[in-house]
Amino acid sequence: MPRKIIIDTDPGQDDAVAILLALGSPQELEVLGIVAVAGNVRVAQNAHNALQILEVAGRTDVPVYVGSERPMRHPLVTAEYVHGSTGLDGPTLPAPVTPLQTQHGVDYIIDTLNAHAAGEITLCCLGPLTNIAMAMVKAPAIVSRIREIVLMGGGCFEGGNITPAAEFNIYVDPEAADVVFRSGVPITQIPLDVSHAMLTTKARVQRFRDIGNRSGVVTAEMLDFFERFDVNKYGWDGGPLHDPCVIAWLLKPDLFKGRQCNVAIETGSELTRGMTVVDYWGVTGRVHNVNYLRSGDSDGFYELLVERISRLP
Ligand code: RIB
Ligand code: CA
């Protein structure tokens, strides 16, 4: 039986590739729905982008919901400087023809968890954690019904990417991350320590183009655009491909290495707002609330991506 997942996301080119990877893996994953969250760009645009990616993949059966418009406390910070004004710059995609769902994304998460057996649904979080935290606050009983949360966010050994201390998804809504990391739900965290090794080198991007299908070409065009900010910033031979690591972990966990440890979120300091304080060496004795991944096999990751995206239209 495929694992049932809800993808909470702010597409974002890397989010879009994660969605394609999930849709290319129907034997292992059943995507129940996609919930947009404010992050890379404003939530309405993120939802629009999700519809476009589903149409590229020929999967307009997957419902898309609009979630939270802003973080729980801080004003919204977006990342057009990375993703472009649309959040999905690179390919020229037709305006989506599929309608958005009318139910609020937070209510969809709550209702779907309540409608399925406890422990049946995994939340795959690719953006700020606002929707997940709001759902936990509005309906605390859902916490025990979540099988697992697999999220891209934070960092430790690689530091931050929006400040020296914080990664974007956690920085945008640290209060939401604090609610989620304290919830007691099993969490697997894919941090910058992993994604910074998953570089979109020219050879790897060309392999998507060489697949010869629409999804491969769109993936290559998205990554060509997406990488330019990070290549310029870090001087690497590609950009770090963050969000597909969440789906890849569900498909092939052996590609990654990490350990159970305590992770806490900085919410009080302006200087280190959104820092994931990772007790990797177990010096605090605090509860091990997170399966913290520290490294990944980049060649195996891209083999998986190419193979699964080649299954799409
Ligand atoms: O810091 C990387 C994360 O922020 C990724 O999820 C990217 O899509 C942006 O949301
Ligand atoms: Ca994202």
Image (cartoon, grey):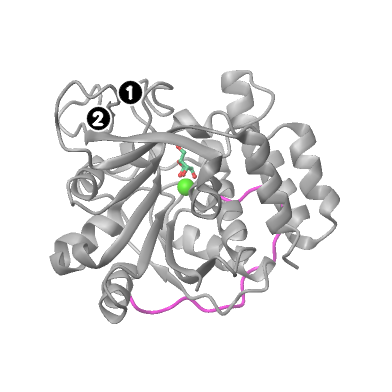
Residue 222 placement, left or right of 47: right
Do callouts 1 and 2 mark residues in contact (Cβ within 8 Å)? yes
Look at mark 2 in the image and give the residue it sits on: 273
Q: Residue 256: which numbered mark, if any?
A: none
For the residue carrying disc 1, how many other residues have a C-alpha within 10 Å: few (<14), some (14-19), or many (20+)?
Answer: many
Q: Is residue 92 visible?
A: no
Residue 117 left/right relative to 27: left
Q: Point out the tag, 1 or 2, that comes first from the N-terminus.
A: 1
Amino acid under disc 2:
Arg
Q: Is residue 167 above or below residue 124?
A: above
Q: Residue at 76% of width from left, 59% of height from top? A: 310
How far apart marks 1 and 2 lie (CA) works out to 8 Å
Residue at x 46%, y 53% (from the top left corner): 10
The answer as to whether callout 1 falls within 8 Å of ligand 1 is no
**In the rendered structure, which amino acid carries the disc numbered 1?**
Ala
Q: Is residue 94 magenta?
A: yes
Residue 19 seen in the figure: yes
Q: Is residue 110 left or right of residue 253?
A: left
The residue nearer to you, when weighing 114 against 43, is: 114
Q: Is residue 293 above or below residue 12?
A: above
Q: Which residues are magenta?
A: 87-103
Identify which residue is drawn at 73% across, 54% down. 307
Position of residue 234 measured from the top left corner of the image (x, y, whole percent): 57, 20
Residue 29 horizontal/vertical position (percent): 52, 66
The main secondary structure of the magenta stretch is loop
In this view, the residue in front, 205 or 302, is 302
Residue carrying label 1: 165
